[in-house]
Amino acid sequence: EAQHTTILIPGWMNDHTAERLDKTYRVLRIDSADAALLPAREVAKIRGIASAGRIDSRFIDALPALEIIAHYGVGYDAVDSRHAAARGVVVTNTPDVLTEEVADTALGLLINTVRELPKAEAFVRAGKWVGDDEYPPSRLTLRERKVGIFGLGRIGLAVARRVEAFGLPVSYHNRSRVEGVSYAYHASLLELAEAVDTLISVAPGTPATDKAVNREVLAALGSDGVFINIGRGSTVDEEALIAALVDGTIAAAGLDVFASEPDVPQALLDLPNVCVLPHLGAASVHTRRAMGNLVADNLDQWFRVGAAKTPVPECVAVAGRG
Ligand code: 8YV
């Protein structure tokens, strides 16, 4: 019966996932999640979606037989999950399998930013390591820093454990206090920023986090302040961040995510005190494969036993028909 179940892949999908789905389902691919691209004779047959990009309410409404959207990624701000839930469509994401990978990347980005390792490597590669002059010591150090984490979920906790192992104190801001941790909680992001000099944003992209890292928050970090973003670009007022880096309000930033990817503002690229990465937090072959398997597992469990494996919180009520 699965062979007759039609799954839609709009836009890019992990190759391994697509191969797995091809073996079990009738897979239809279109360039993006645009209702105008849906072949009319298929519209009523599509029961599942596997996707990594944007799925809006119009697209969901264009698919009357849709039951499940299996999103490739732990952050699912690209999917209108509330609308899906209201329509009885379950949305799943890919938690846990990428937690440690993203936390590794966060620490790597932090060290690169503070100790300017990419610049030092470029120095060696440019053949400048000659003579007796030593490469200039970095102005900034991790030593004696106080680290604040914005968003103490699974990934935030994995970042916190690493920061602790580096011998640095950790505090955090989160929608609510997290039970069972010894890190200091701050009820507002501004209070957290006032208490630390290094802020790591792991927060998801939601209306509540939109541009939460603003001019005031950055100013509160102080002139030795370092900002790292491994969560979502939408959590930062990018204009304010650029201004703070230009005028020395903070010292440096390390960014894996941006407001309007893949566009990185030229003003950021022009700054010497910024490290940029192309949204690769989870991007090892190993972890991508695990994410891809979880996408396929969610579809398989749904169509076999009627219970999604990792539904997002707003869809839990529709996630198990078993
Ligand atoms: C992307 C991510 O989803 O998991 C997340 O939330 O940000 C990434 O893993 C991935 O790049 C696919 O778009």
Image: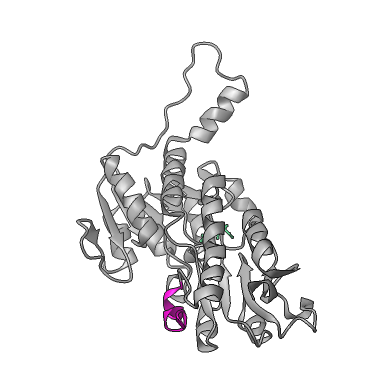
Residue at image coords 48%, 73%: 308
Give the number of callouts: 0
Q: Is residue 315 above or below residue 288?
A: below
Q: Is residue 26 above or below residue 193?
A: below
Magenta segment range? 311-322
Q: Is residue 108 above or below residue 40?
A: above
Q: Is residue 219 visible?
A: no
Quarter, ligand 1: bottom right
| Location of residue 317 (image quadrant) | bottom left
- Which quadrant: the C terminus? bottom left
- Which quadrant: the N terminus? bottom right
Q: Position of residue 138 (x, y in %)?
A: 42, 32
Left or right placement of residue 29 versus residue 262 in this view: right
For this orientation, the residue located farthest to the top is: 131
Nearer-the-camera pick, 246 or 46: 46
Q: Position of residue 190 (x, y in %)?
A: 33, 64
User: Is 314 contained in the magenta span?
Assistant: yes
Nearer-the-camera pick, 202 or 273: 202
Nearer-the-camera pick, 195 or 172: 172
Q: Position of residue 46 (x, y in %)?
A: 68, 79
Residue at image coords 63%, 56%: 14
